[in-house]
Amino acid sequence: MFSLTFLFAVIVVVMVMTFLFVIVIVVVTSLFTVVVMVASSFAVIVLASYFVMVVVAFRFAVIVVASHFAIVVMAFHFAVVVMASRFMMVVMAFCFAMVMIVFRFVVVVFVVVLSSVFSFSLIWINKIMIFGSKY
């Protein structure tokens, strides 16, 4: 009987130890699963945040490049407008100078021609008056 009781006690101890070992394995496995899930979710969150940062940085780069392109286009348009306005100023100054030169030429010509005509007519009037009786 001693041996059966001893054998029964050994079997109970082995079974209790086995159950405790199984419980420990289940708890450790569960903890490992929780740690893996938390780590994987953390990794997913980190990767997703990196992806979002890359997307935001890409959009920011696109906006910066587009704004720089717009700045270049606006600067080109501004340069075209400035050059056109300066060209128009030069053309207008040239036209004004030509008008002034023509006006002065016309004034000088009229002054010289009119004075010549007037003096020529006075000379002829004088000749006619002096020598008018002979003609």
Image (cartoon, grey):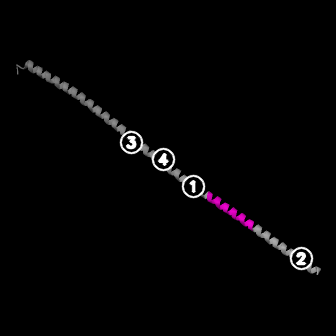
Mark number displayed over residue 84: 3
Query: In this figure, which residue is indicated by the disc labeled 4?
Result: 71
Amino acid type at circle 3 is: Ala
Q: Earlier in the sequence, mark 4 or mark 1?
A: 1
Residue in the picture at 76% in, 70% down: 26
In this rendered view, identify the residue nearer to me: 61 or 25.
Answer: 25
Give the mark nearest the N terminus, 1 or 2: 2
Assess disc 3: are there few (<14), some (14-19) or many (≥20) residues with their C-alpha within 10 Å of its C-alpha: few
Q: Which residue is disc 2 drawn over?
A: 9
Q: Position of residue 5 (x, y in %)?
A: 91, 79
Q: Left or right? Give the position of 19 relative to 122.
A: right
According to the picture, the residue beneath numbered tag 1 turns out to be 56
**In front of the other: 112 or 68:** 68
Quadrant location of the N terminus?
A: bottom right
- Return the residue nearer the eye: 104 or 17: 17
Q: Earlier in the sequence, mark 4 or mark 2?
A: 2
Q: CA distance from mark 1 to mark 2?
A: 69 Å
Mark 2: which amino acid?
A: Ala
